[in-house]
Image (cartoon, grey):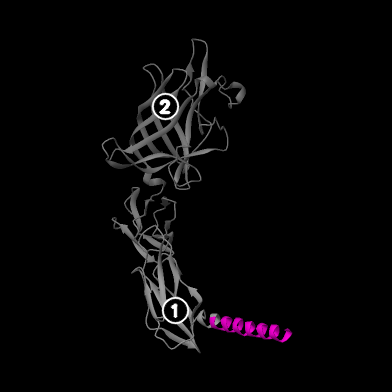
Amino acid sequence: MRQYVNLISFLFLLIFTACNESSSESTKIELRVIESKIEFNGKAGEGSILIEVESDRTIEVKTSNAWCKVNGDIVTVEGNKRLINLSAIRNPTLASRSSLITISDGVTSQVVCASQAGSIFYADDNLERRFNNDEQTFKIDIVSSVGYKVDIVNDWLSVNEQTDDFVEIKLTKNTTGKPRVAVVSVVGLSGISSTYAIYQYEGMDLINTYIAQAYVEWKYAGASGYIDLTNSAVSKNSDGSYNVRFTMGLTEKITFNISLRAVFDKNALLIESNQYQPGQDLALSETESLSTFVICGDDEGLKLNNFRIGLAPSLVSDTEGNVFQGLMFKEEDKPAISSNAYMSIAFFTSPDNPGNDTYVSEMTIIIPAMLFVSQD
């Protein structure tokens, strides 16, 4: 009886072993993907897939999207390893995309997925550039996967060098005796663009008479709005500094003739804060008056010392959409015209150097915006 049991066990073992061998042979993989390099950025590029084959059957490769295609013949690397080279065209859109790659020997197949990032375009966000009158160059930094073009309409600017990482612009010498401005557009092939205002001038170029306007807020009178300034001009003093003057008529009886000392630095007429205006006292009664100072600061409050506000050329437009050049406020250390730079006419009970103890805050006239437009 024991012999029969041993015989049955032996036969079962043979059958089990044969089944395993048959199963192993039927599931044997004859085509394997060893390595793939098929993640593309937005630019045109090349990638590859390394496979291993166990047969002599012909390998066929298909891609599901036209932007990704097989580049040349399949190459034997060594032994049974084959290299499939692929290429991707530039992605003109912001969206990423993918393509299925099917590799087959007629019996076994493998599917892998290629991907390509969307277009990237970024140009330096310093959109206002200011230069003196010398011939010179400057660079605009670029990050782009799609290529870009540069549009310039003014003949005093030209592209000096253009690479994938930057564009260098050349300025000719300004001999016009006036400030000048040009617009440069950097346009990515994806449609995204950045536009730059390029100014070239020096202090002497700003000497002129102007038509001027200011936005005024006077809480004491409960009034705010735009008013015209008269007698507006920029002139040069004998010590090399400049004078900015204008007349501000708030009412028929209240008029201020303002005269401000400025120095030309950092591409602007920089007006120092805390400038006393002699002869411009504000009469409260027959016996009491307030001395008048021009203070430069911001809308957070008065900054009496160590603060300068810039007056610099800027492109502006009127209500009809006409674009012209004028002078507007800017912060001292920033190239762009700024809404954070304010001027105030402040009043004190003493004509001496003003201090917070003599400051009559409720009388302050805030000037958040001022525009000078050349008369010629």
Q: Is residue 11 magenta?
A: yes
Cα distance in 3D space between marks 1 and 2 = 81 Å
Circle 2 residue: 216
Query: The C terminus lies in which quarter of the figure?
Result: top left
Q: Is residue 218 above or below residue 374?
A: above
Q: Disc 1 residue type?
A: Thr
List x then y, in percent, for residue 20: 58, 81
Specify which label sits upstream in the sequence, 1 or 2: 1
Residue 326 bears which disc, if any? none
Query: The N terminus lies in which quarter of the figure?
Result: bottom right
Q: Nearer the viewer, residue 144 or 332?
A: 144
Q: Nearer the viewer, residue 179 or 51?
A: 51
Q: What is the quadrant of residue 157 in the picture?
A: bottom left
Residue at the image point whose x is 46% and y is 27% from the top: 366
Residue furthest to the front: 1
List x then y, in percent, for residue 145: 41, 64
Q: Secondary structure at mark 2?
A: strand
Q: Nearer the viewer, residue 170 or 62?
A: 62
> Which portion, as a residue range, is magenta?
1-22
- Left or right of 324, for residue 78: right
Q: Is residue 109 magenta?
A: no
